[in-house]
Image (cartoon, rainbow, N blue to C red):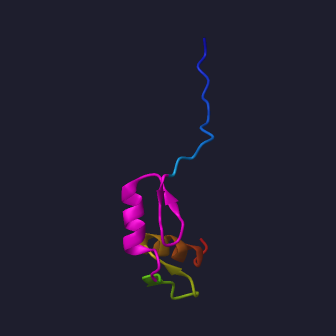
Amino acid sequence: MKRLNVARTEDIRRFLCNTCGRSYKNKRSLSSHKKIECGKPPRYYCNLCPRGFFYKSKLMLHTVQHYPV
């Protein structure tokens, strides 16, 4: 008998930010959001366009888009 993979239709996000309304699956993600993102301006900005990012790694991924290979 084959076992069927059933996709979960419920996305349980029970940790809610009381400032902006975003929700997270675990408490650690909510804490990180509050510490780094919520209500704060981005820390890293692209030198080639006006985009801003909260994480340096996201800026680096974005920067690659400006230099097509």
Q: Which residue does the image show at 60% across and 28% down from the upper left?
A: 5
**Of the pair 47 and 53, the residue shown nearer to us:** 53
Image position of 35 (left or right of 48)? left
Quadrant for the N terminus in the image:
top right
Q: Which residue does the image show at 57% across and 47% down from the upper left?
A: 11
Image position of 58 (left or right of 35)? right
Residue at the extreme top: 1
In the rendered image, which quarter is residue 9 located in?
Answer: top right
Percent x, y of residue 13: 51, 52
Percent x, y of residue 8: 59, 38
In the rendered image, which quarter is residue 29 located in?
Answer: bottom left
Q: Is residue 60 above or below residue 14?
A: below
| Magenta stretch: includes residue 39 | yes
Percent x, y of residue 10: 60, 43
Quadrant for the C terminus in the image:
bottom right
Magenta-highlighted residues: 14-40
Q: Which residue does the image show at 62% across and 23% down from the upper left?
A: 4
Image position of 36 (left or right of 14)? left
Q: Which residue does the image show at 51% across and 59% down from the upper left?
A: 23
**Of the pair 33 and 53, the residue shown nearer to us:** 33
| Magenta stretch: includes residue 34 | yes
